[in-house]
Image (cartoon, grey):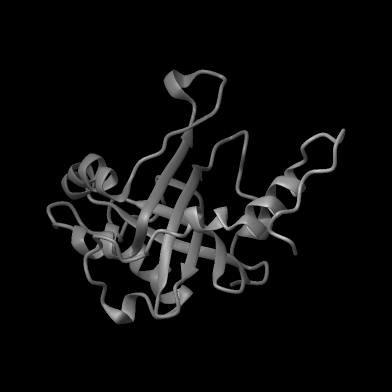
């Protein structure tokens, strides 16, 4: 392609035309990905060796009985620089749904004290994973209990987890989740017994 290509006169600017222009003029270099390792604690290689390993580590590191401190450096080590966590809910109990965006550091600060004071065990009960090249998405259904021995969970839901592999390990890019409710029960296809991981 010719880097000096001009938009045909009289035609509206299209997204495709702008994308092509960006690519051929080298502006794409300004959008270079952020290095995954920027300011991240070192991860245990076993935690990040596969999609299964990093998701298992993610649930394990936030879970524990009341009074048990969590390893927040291990938690942070799972996330790419710039990662986000986004719970979805209805602020003030209203009718409008909203997404709250927080960083892994903010999650550790905001949720950490409650998890450690009250006990919290979250386990994956089913997963549907899609992969393309070095990116992946997992719909990870979960159950949450205060104690691992509680017979019933106090809540369930789905974590939508986006992941990437930088060539040496897996990283969590984002987690976007919704707790189950009467108006949005977890569909059967995302529960155990429908085909599995």
Q: Is residue 63 visible?
A: no
- Residue appearing at x 27%, y 55% in the figure: 147
Q: Position of residue 190 (x, y in %)?
A: 62, 58
Q: Is residue 89 above or below residue 42?
A: above
Q: Position of residue 191 (x, y in %)?
A: 60, 60
User: Is 76 in front, or is 57?
Assistant: 76
- Residue appearing at x 42%, y 62% in the figure: 172
The N terminus sits in image quarter: bottom right
User: Is 58 in front, or is 156?
Assistant: 58
Q: Report which quarter residue 20 is drawn in.
A: bottom right
- Residue appearing at x 21%, y 65% in the figure: 41
- Residue appearing at x 59%, y 35% in the figure: 182
User: Is 150 in front, or is 104?
Assistant: 104
Taking the image as shown, residue 12 lies to the left or right of residue 118, namely right
**Residue that sits furthest to the front in the current view:** 4
Q: Is residue 183 visible?
A: yes
Taking the image as shown, residue 88 lies to the left or right of residue 56, namely right
The C terminus sits in image quarter: bottom right
Image mark count: 0
Q: Position of residue 142 (x, y in %)?
A: 47, 56
User: Is 154 in front, or is 92?
Assistant: 92
Q: Position of residue 144 (x, y in %)?
A: 39, 52
């Amino acid at each position: 392609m010719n880097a000096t290509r001009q938009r045909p006169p009289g035609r509206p600017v299209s997204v495709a035309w702008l994308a092509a222009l960006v690519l051929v003029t080298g502006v794409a270099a300004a959008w270079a990905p952020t290095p995954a390792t920027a300011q991240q604690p070192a991860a245990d290689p076993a935690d990040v060796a596969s999609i299964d390993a990093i998701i298992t580590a993610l649930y394990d590191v936030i879970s524990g009985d009341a009074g048990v401190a969590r390893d927040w450096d291990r938690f942070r080590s799972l996330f790419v620089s710039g990662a986000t966590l986004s719970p979805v809910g209805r602020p003030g109990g209203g009718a409008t749904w909203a997404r709250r965006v927080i960083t892994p550091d903010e999650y550790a600060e905001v949720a950490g004290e409650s998890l450690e004071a009250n006990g919290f065990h979250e386990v994956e009960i089913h997963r549907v994973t899609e992969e393309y090249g070095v990116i992946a998405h997992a719909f990870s259904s979960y159950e949450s209990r205060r104690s691992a021995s509680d017979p019933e969970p106090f809540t369930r839901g789905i974590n939508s987890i986006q992941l990437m592999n930088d060539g040496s390990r897996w990283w969590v890019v984002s987690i976007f989740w919704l707790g189950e409710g009467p108006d949005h029960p977890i569909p059967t296809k995302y529960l155990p017994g429908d085909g599995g991981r």
